[in-house]
Image: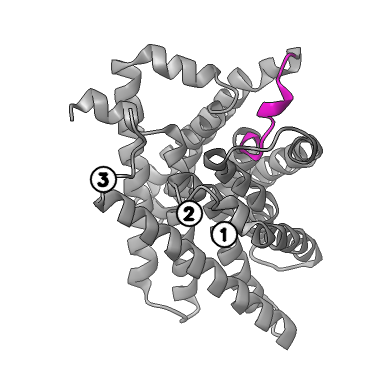
């Protein structure tokens, strides 16, 4: 397979893998600070997530150079463009992993990624205000540019000690989520059912509440207050819905599109650890360890299934 053929077959949706692997690494990094796990596990997962992001970024750059027409078509496609926002947003996420190792590089990547995701959102999402956007394309993937990307920036700036800037990004992501969700839920309930291979994108619906909760904790110093509990509660409701629909999601078999679930799961792992540390009452302790264990189990399943596809040569979609 030539280089051109390889980069053409790597879908931009693969950036979703970065969120899951890196997010799980962040959870285990925090667990290590509490004495609940080895430090090497979190750092290994963070390194793996960073490596995946860098590899995909280079592949995307290669596509821009070798197949600019295809990249432009993907950018203009209402069902695909949202995942492109994970390129700069993923860089912001990676910056939090680099922070303990190289502060200058971490801050540079954080600022560049935050700026890049804002430019992308303004360039691609603002024109949608003109109208003529097909309701069929209003899937949970539409959360990525304005909701997920801003929540990621809130996490990064809050963790880096810039809580005020983090709060600005948190507000942008939170209000964007609240305004988009009614349209997305209405589409899922009333429009044509998504085909088997396309159903994985619904997994993004799991993310906003859990990611908002984690982002809020990063901004407020990991204080699990009532607002964090409210966000966690809505996340749990979405989790129950997802568990009810498991057979429907996997009707077409496992595919890498299932990584759409990973951002919500990794945020759930991070939030549940902070819940366990902050709330010492028995009911919250039980809940937090159930959620943390479930998130790890499901994310490990995603990793194993993806590695099996990779080893069998079936990870990349056909030509």
Q: Upstream in the sequence, badge 1 or badge 3?
A: 1
Q: Upstream in the sequence, badge 3 or badge 2?
A: 2
Residue neighbourhood size for the residue with mark 3, other residues' Cα within 10 Å, grouped as few (<14), some (14–19), many (≥20): few
What residue is drawn where x is 38% and y is 58%?
305
- Residues shaded magenta: 132-142
Quadrant in the picture for the N terminus: top left
Q: Is residue 135 located in the magenta-colored stretch of the structure?
A: yes
**Residue 197 rendering spot, x and y as whole percentages:** 52, 40
- Provide the residue designation for mark 1: 265
Above or below — where is 150 with respect to 303? above
Give the side of residue 288 with respect to residue 197, left or right.
right
- Mark yes or no: residue 111 visible: yes
Above or below — where is 96 with respect to 178? below
Q: Which disc number belongs to residue 313?
A: 3
Q: Measure the alpha-carbon separation of dots 3 and 2.
A: 22 Å
Question: Does the residue at mark 1 contact the one at mark 2 (Cβ under 8 Å)?
Answer: yes
């Amino acid at each position: 397979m030539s280089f051109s053929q390889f980069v053409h077959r790597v879908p931009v949706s693969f950036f979703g893998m970065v969120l899951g692997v890196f997010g799980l690494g962040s959870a285990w990094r925090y667990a290590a600070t509490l004495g609940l796990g080895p430090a090497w596990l979190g750092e290994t997962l963070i390194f793996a997530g960073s490596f995946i992001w860098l590899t995909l970024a280079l592949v995307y750059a290669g596509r821009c150079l070798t197949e600019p027409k295809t990249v432009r078509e993907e950018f203009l496609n209402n069902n695909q463009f949202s995942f492109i926002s994970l390129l700069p947003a993923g860089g912001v996420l990676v910056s939090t992993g680099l922070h303990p190792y190289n502060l200058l590089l971490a801050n540079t990547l954080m600022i560049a990624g935050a700026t890049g995701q804002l430019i992308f959102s303004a360039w691609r999402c603002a024109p949608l205000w003109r109208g003529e956007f097909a309701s069929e394309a209003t899937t949970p993937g539409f959360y990525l540019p304005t909701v997920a990307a801003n929540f990621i920036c809130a996490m990064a700036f809050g963790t880096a000690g810039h809580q005020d800037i983090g709060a600005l990004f948190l507000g942008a992501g939170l209000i964007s989520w609240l305004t988009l969700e009614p349209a997305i839920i209405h589409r899922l309930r009333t429009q044509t059912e998504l085909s088997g291979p396309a159903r994985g994108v619904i997994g993004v619906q799991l993310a906003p509440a859990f990611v908002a909760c984690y982002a809020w904790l990063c901004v407020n110093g990991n204080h699990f207050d009532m607002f964090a509990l409210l966000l966690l509660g809505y996340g749990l409701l979405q989790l129950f819905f997802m568990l009810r629909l498991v057979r429907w999601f996997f009707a077409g078999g496992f595919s890498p599109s299932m990584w759409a679930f990973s951002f919500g799961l990794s945020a759930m792992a991070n939030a549940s650890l902070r819940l366990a540390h902050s709330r010492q009452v028995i009911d919250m302790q039980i809940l937090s360890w159930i959620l943390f264990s479930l998130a790890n189990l499901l994310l490990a399943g995603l990793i194993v299934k993806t590695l099996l596809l990779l080893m069998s040569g079936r990870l990349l979609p056909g030509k």
